[in-house]
Each structure stands twice: as structure tokens, then as C-alpha cells.
Amino acid sequence: MITTVGDLDRQLRRREADERLARTPAKYLVMSGKGGVGKTTVCVNLALAKAAAGARVGILDVDFHGPDVAGALFLSARVEADDRDRPIPVRAAENLHVLTVQHLLSDPDEAVMWRGPRKTRAVEQFVTNAAWPELDCFLVDSPPGTGDEALSAFKHVPGLQALLVTSGHSLSLADAAKAASFLKSAAAPLAGVVESMSSLVCPRCGGESPLCPEGAVEEFAAKRGVPLLARLPWDLEAQRLSESLKKPILEAAPESLLARRFRELAGRL
Ligand SMILES: Nc1ncnc2c1ncn2[C@@H]1O[C@H](COP(=O)(O)OP(=O)(O)OP(=O)(O)O)[C@@H](O)[C@H]1O
Ligand SMILES: [Mg+2]
């Protein structure tokens, strides 16, 4: 029920966002059970691969306590507002738009100390009240686990599907199993699994050695009836180049095995 002008404005923005999102065919939440498995790296490089292939891509960072999307893109910027006072996602590349709380902080080291309801509201506002352009692909980077951020993203982004990132280590798979059962309980679709740290690329010879029991992640995905979308190697040289050139892996080491796998992943989504 609409009782105030504020309510009306909120409903109009919600409807605008729903219509815009309905025109965006690919919408993925990059999630994991365990932390530090490479979600942000997957999100950013997948976005760059999609954008390089001509798609209009948006990244929404809902990892409020560890907003790494800006750092992974080596993009420092400040969010501006449009004439309707809506935050304008920062343009990271020709076809790539990014909205992260990191770009709203006056001090880059400042910690965001929000409890659940504040985070839930922030996700809603970032989705419905930001000046997103027309997009072909909308990626949401999330913190590890199954908390408020993932729940709110599924609530406020109609048609959102999960990409579950895990390594083949038993602890990572155990936490990924919880993430998969969370998705089932939340009636949220799982598009597929991305295996991280599947192998080590030797920085000297470029050879690939397995790091985890082969087939464990494939079995995990098969048990849930979803595809294993990519197997991403741990690539020390690509990461070293990324750090030293201050560019994401796809741009710093475009010919690396890891960059090739990111492009293959982009082609499958
Ligand atoms: N395939 C890879 N090869 C080499 N280094 C990688 C690879 N994937 C990720 N890294 C590095 O590992 C670290 C953790 O990756 P990342 O931040 O993407 O993980 P995350 O899952 O997003 O972490 P969090 O749970 O804290 O959000 C980063 O320093 C990143 O550069
Ligand atoms: Mg991250």
C-alpha cells in the first residue's frame, strides 16, 4: 500500500529496476562456502572476458566487509550521483560498470560496520536505486557463506543464479555443500560450479600439476545435477604479473592458461 510520496518513489524505482533486470539475460551471484577461494578473481576476470567479447557488464560488490572488486580491478574512484541523486556505477572499462562500497568511502582503509538489516537495505538500494545502464550481464560478488548478502541479492535481483566457487579440498567442499543446500532452501538456482586451485601452473616451465584429488569437484557438481563450468589453475606467474603491472589477470597475462580458462568460462555463460 502506498501512503507517502517516499513510498511511491520507492515503488517506482523498484519497478524500473525490475524492468531493467528483466532485459538483462545473464545474472550471476559469485558465491562460495569457504572464504578466499577466488570468488572476486573469478567475478572480475569473467566480467572482463564478457566485456571484451562485446557484452555490457555490471558488477555489484555486496561484500561490504571485504570489498575487493575495486582492488582486483586496480580501480580507485569516487561514486558520483546523477540528477535524481542516484549513485552512478563507476566505469571500469568501455563496457564494464562497477558499484562497490569501497568507492563510497572517504578513507580506503575505513571498515564498514553494518549489521544485517543495514546490509539488506544496502543491497536493495544498490540494485534498485543506482543509475545502472542497460546490461547484458550482471555479476554480483559476495562474501563467503550464506548470510544476509546472498539472501538479499536473491531477493532483490529477479532471475539471479549462483555460480559456486570451490576447490577440491575436503573443507572447501564441505562448506560448498552447505552453500548448495542454502540455495535449495532459498529456492535459488545453481547455474554451475567453478573449481578453483585445481592445479598449479609451474612459473618456471609452465607445466600443470594437480593440487587436489581429481574428480572431487566434478562429482560434487554431478551429485547436484549441475555442470562443472571451469577448472581454474593456481597461476603464480599470472598473479605476479597482475600485481606488478597493476592490472587484472586477464589483461596482465592474457595468454596465460588461467586467462584462457576465464575466457572459456565466459563463453559458457
Ligand atoms: N587462480 C589463481 N591463481 C593465482 N592467484 C589467485 C587465483 N585466484 C585467486 N588468486 C589470488 O588469491 C587471493 C584470494 O582471491 P580472491 O580475493 O579472489 O578470493 P575470494 O574468494 O574473493 O576471497 P573472500 O572470500 O575474502 O572474498 C587473491 O590475492 C588473488 O589474487
Ligand atoms: Mg572476495
Image (spheres, grey):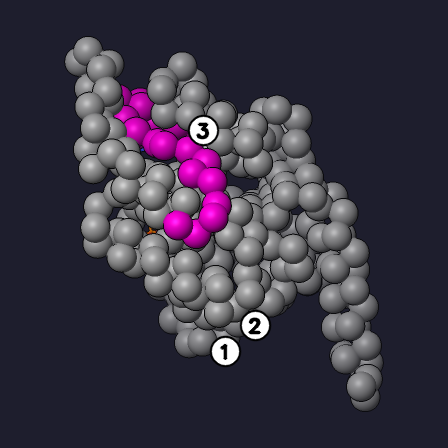
Q: Which mark is residue 117?
A: 1
User: Which-is-in-front pick, marks 2 and 3?
Assistant: 3
Residue located beneath label 2 in the image? 121
Q: Position of residue 55 (x, y in %)?
A: 66, 32
Type of amino acid at the residue the image marks with label 3 = Phe
Quarter holding the N terminus is: bottom right
Q: Please tell me which residue lies in front, 53 or 243.
A: 53
Badge 2 or badge 3: first in the primary sequence: 2
Q: How many marks?
A: 3
Q: Are marks 1 and 2 in contact (CB under 8 Å)?
A: yes
Q: Quadrant of ligand 1?
A: top left
Type of amino acid at the residue the image marks with label 1 = Pro
Query: At 82% across and 80% down in the image, what residue appears?
Result: 5
- Within 10 angstroms of label 2, few (less than 14), some, or many (20 or more) residues? few
Judged from the image, the secondary structure of the residue bearing numbered disc 1 is helix
Residue located beneath label 3 in the image? 262
**Magenta-tinted stretch:** 223-249
Question: Does residue 139 sit above or below 73 in this rendering?
Answer: below
Can see residue 224? yes
